[in-house]
Amino acid sequence: MRRLKTHFEQIPVEVVKKIIAGGSLKMATSFGMESRDDGLQYPDWQSPVQGALLELDRDKLKARVAEAEAAIFNRLQAISQDTDHTAERQAIEDALANLRVVKRESLGFPDWEKK
């Protein structure tokens, strides 16, 4: 059975980098992101993540990333005792990878994977 891509996997990294570097929301809408909550499978945490990925104001970006990470943390706490959330956990892992790119590329956080 073929695994469906999560919402965040459908956005190429190059597009996210361009958005971060000062691209426009028009670029994001070309990837099916017309509205922040439209079609999100897990809007409680995906909406803040999407807000962070689309934030163009560097001064607001750090707060958006923190808000997204807090929403993910809260959701992970809520589902911590259930084994029934495999797809959501994978989506969270993908979202966190995208947030790491934002933190590294736009906010100057270190790349912990570099050796």
Image (cartoon, grey):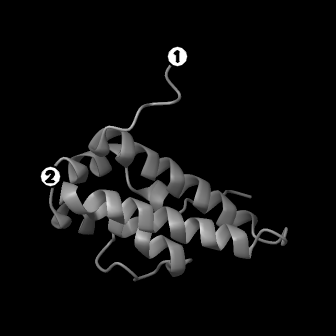
Judged left or right of residue 62, residue 76 is right
Q: Is residue 51 above or below residue 9?
A: below
59 or 44, which lies in front? 59
User: Residue 90 placed where, x, y %?
Assistant: 65, 58
57 or 63, which lies in front? 63
Badge 2 amino acid:
Gly
Badge 1 amino acid:
Lys
User: Residue, x 28% and y 59% (percent of image)?
Assistant: 61
User: Residue 69 placed where, x, y %?
Assistant: 50, 62
Q: Is residue 36 above or below residue 13?
A: below
Label 2 or label 1, whichever comes before in sequence order: 2
Can you identify the residue that label 2 sits on?
Answer: 22
User: Residue 79 placed where, x, y %?
Assistant: 75, 73
**Residue 4 at least partly seen:** no
Mark 2 nearby-residue class (10 Å; few <14, some 14–19, many ≥20): few
Secondary structure of the residue carrying numbered label 1: loop
Can you identify the residue that label 1 sits on?
Answer: 115
**Residue 23 at least partly seen:** yes
User: Residue, x 28% and y 50% (percent of image)?
Assistant: 15
Q: Residue 77 got which mark?
A: none
Mark-to-mark CA distance, 2 and 1: 29 Å
